[in-house]
């Protein structure tokens, strides 16, 4: 009878969950959903990645093994040190550009989450002299610097595939929230996974608005730095139903509907 | 046995329905569908809102609690006074910009429904000197004024988050059907929920047409005000199977297919 | 018992089917699918219509009652005379612009199917001086004339809502396959429903290609009239698996997957 | 009774499978999925085709019968000789432009897979003087030549419908990976099906990036040939979870979700 089943053996997954105390389970959940959202919203294609600093240990961060973001599950999430190397399961393929993440976490103690993407409307701004200024995105202040591997290291494959390039990119990013990478994409940082997803999506949206404003021609009224400061301060209040809390509920539902279960 | 169940207690929802006599149930249904349509048709993302004046009391209007429009259900609809404050359930998060709605309802007795959106192709017109003139949209006459919080109140977060800003926006809107909001979006008004959805969608569509005509270059033949007047008069006949009656049937089906049940 | 059911009464639908002998059933099937395809491929939104000349009687044509094309079923198809008036079921709402169809069937005995749409990328060409010339669409030769209600009838609502306007449009169309309608859309004609759907879709596609070529700048190599003539001759061979036979199989499947059953 | 069924006769499909030893089954699987991916990713519509050189016999290649790529199943795959003619099943409709494939396989022993498409954002580059240079696509070096049937053969229907035109196109392609075809589309080659799909998709993506960079105006920083060489060398390492291995997993899942089973 049903009552006489033998005790379920403790699954590897249950062990994982136990290991993941201290809030890290929630961060991994957000990381998986964040991967899916970035894919469904068109910020990443089969490339690009999102990471979160480990809430248990600021010297480590969490990120998927090398896999298309639209397919990432909790089982894919690995832990990395600030040297960019995996803490365990070294047999799995990992992102070549993990040094984007490791070096930014090292340089910016305030940053808890990082997105690297080939955000399609952002790239044109990385290869022209037109600055990606804010129409609506307050986090594009103070500025959106452009990093070029060519200036930093001469002829390369454009990938941030070692700590030195990661360090140079982090240096260009400085205290900003977004940096473009010439002919390649961008990097976006924030204080939570939900906020970095929000910023990555609205960086792409702002690029579309600016491109279209350019096409209309004439002078453009940008968001003023004074206005941006007020918006940022308001959003930092983290009110339920506002800001990234509202967007996350919507994007999460869309992402699950489009890409299926999380495990 | 099944037959001996005790009488179902009168559910909160049934009470709500009873309370909602006088045609308000139909308005709420349209409001919920309207939220979903605006999302599915790309006029709103996780932000933006749609309201309707309460058919039982012109001093009140109905609108969702603070939530992404694509997720709104009948249970989310709340009632607000013309001071922009909720009549009950004050514990719920509400839209900061509800004063767009309250002040327009106050200033424009003819307006029965209001949409505020970040309509993506409309925003570029709000930050350039190119006026959003009608290629096809008759309701864009007499004109589409541009409201700028900067002129009205100096440095702000661009949000219409108090009655004074709502009043200033309503003043800029005047007797027009659409006003742009600089670096932010637009506000659209009409005499029913179905018509305001229609106008919001075709404001975005007209912006796309005009942007593309601008890209082709040369002079543009706009809809003449005389033509617009004839179209508006014809559409006011509200014939079954025409105008917003035809579009609503299609958009409703798409919205339900994409966003699921209403409750 | 199941075996003793009384004989099924002959349903209204069965009667309809019997009435529809002489190949007209196949035309209605294509008309219904054609409505759905034009919607799914983005040529029509909730407006626009497609008709076919009645194969049993060249003085009549078949078209849906006034309804969004994406929702049209076989039951919606009605029969009209060349005066643009319905042969029966006069109680139903019908398209105001049915005179586009009636007057073209009257003027062009070779035309067996007509599409009227608000094809989004085509409209910009109707309000600028940039001619819609063929990059790939051979049927855009000899030319794509632009009809303007303003020249034909002064201030109107732009709709072809009477026989005189239909006649004027048919006159502008002449022996061409496509005519633009200023600030409104286009009309496309062909010798079958499948071909007119093909042409309507590739008129929109050609407009997109030309718009983008214009954005790149410089001179454009159009399809030569000599090349167009050879393509048209080749396509007239109607080979299985080629031309509109290949596209119909694909579009039909997409349309059914997106809009559901036909009845 | 069910148990007494006579032995299933060996189905034609089983025979096919037996016949397809030597790795060709895997190639056919990729070819079918590749067809679907190119459709779902918007590189082909109902036209365009993808082929693979037969791994058992370099003098033959595999390609679908004449059918929309989004519908292709394993049963549709046929075998062709380097004369462009089918080895068997000559009753089926076949692509008129199969000589694109046959002549490229003849001229380029290194090429194992070929895509021909009407890639929408690529075509504008084929009719203007703006070269399709790489923003991100290293395989666009050394150059992307433009083939024009008009130069090769005067007035034609633009189709590569005989060996002479195929040979002329192959000659224009030379040792490059991509050639444009004026007013028509492009041809893309690679060493595997997965890589040619990757290149076809990123050729379209690169065209979009370049078009947008052109719209922003001013000088453009292209990928340098030195950088392209390093990227190509790195990608040739074929690491698991990287390059076309990562994209294939994602695109395959999307294609199956959108277009259904393979048989």
Image (tube, coloured by chain):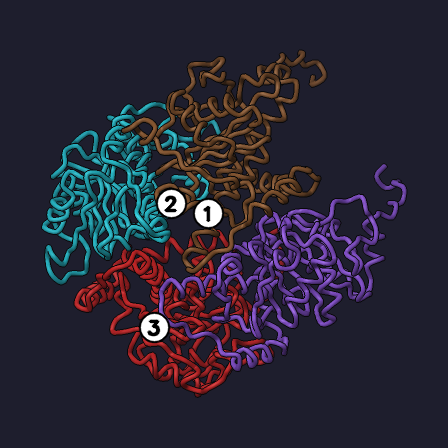
Chain colours: A red, B cyan, C brown, D purple
Q: Quadrant of the C terminus of chain B?
A: top left
Report how far apart the C-alphas of labels 2 and 1 lie in the structure.
9 Å
Relative to residue C195, is residue D140 depicted above or below?
A: below
Give the residue at x 84% y 48%.
D12
The residue that mark 2 highlights is: C124
Quadrant of residue A171 within the rendered picture: bottom left
Relative to residue C121, is residue D212 depicted above or below?
A: below
The residue that mark 3 highlights is: A129
Relative to residue D221, is residue D28 depicted above or below?
A: above
Q: What chain does mark 3 sit on?
A: A
Circles 3 and 2 in contact, beta carbons < 8 Å: no
Is D37 on the left-hand or right-hand side of B39? Answer: right
The residue that mark 1 highlights is: C207
Circles 2 and 1 in contact, beta carbons < 8 Å: yes
Q: Which is nearer the eye, D127 or D239?
A: D127
Quadrant of residue D42 within the rendered picture: bottom right
Relative to residue B251, is residue B48 depicted above or below?
A: below
Marks 3 and 1 on same chain: no
Q: Position of residue C91 (x, y in %)?
A: 42, 14
Q: Secondary structure at mark 2?
A: helix
The answer to whether residue D120 of the structure is visible from this angle is yes
Report how far apart the C-alphas of labels 3 and 2 lie in the structure.
30 Å
Q: Position of residue D192 (x, y in %)?
A: 68, 67
Label 3 neighbourhood size at 10 Å, few (<14), some (14-19), many (20+)?
Answer: some
Q: Position of residue C201 (x, y in %)?
A: 52, 42
Q: Position of residue B203 (x, y in %)?
A: 30, 43
The answer to whether residue D249 of the structure is visible from this angle is no
Q: What chain does mark 1 sit on?
A: C
């Amino acid at each position: 009878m049903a009552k006489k089943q033998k005790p379920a053996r403790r699954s590897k997954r249950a062990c994982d969950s136990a290991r993941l105390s201290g809030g890290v389970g929630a961060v991994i959940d957000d990381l998986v959903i964040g991967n899916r959202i970035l894919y469904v919203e068109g910020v990443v294609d089969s490339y690009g990645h999102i990471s979160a600093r480990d809430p248990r240990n600021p010297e480590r961060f969490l990120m998927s093994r090398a896999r298309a973001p639209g397919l990432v599950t909790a089982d894919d999430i690995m832990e990395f040190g600030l040297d960019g190397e995996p803490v365990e399961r070294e047999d799995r393929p990992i992102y070549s550009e993990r040094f984007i993440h490791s070096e930014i976490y090292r340089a910016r103690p305030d940053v808890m989450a990082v997105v690297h993407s080939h955000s399609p409307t952002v790239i044109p701004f990385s290869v022209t002299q037109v600055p990606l200024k804010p129409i609506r995105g307050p986090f594009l202040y103070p500025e959106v610097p452009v990093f070029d591997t060519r200036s930093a290291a001469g002829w390369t494959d454009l990938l941030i595939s070692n700590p030195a390039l990661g360090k140079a990119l982090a240096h260009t990013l400085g205290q900003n929230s977004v940096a473009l990478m010439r002919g390649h994409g961008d990097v976006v940082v924030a204080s939570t996974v939900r906020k970095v997803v929000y910023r990555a999506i609205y960086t792409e949206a702002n690029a579309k608005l600016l491109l279209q404003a350019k096409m209309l021609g004439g002078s453009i009224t940008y968001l003023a730095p004074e206005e941006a400061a007020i918006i940022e301060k308001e959003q930092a209040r983290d009110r339920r139903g506002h800001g990234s809390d509202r967007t996350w509920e919507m994007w999460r539902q869309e992402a699950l509907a489009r890409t299926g279960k999380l495990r």
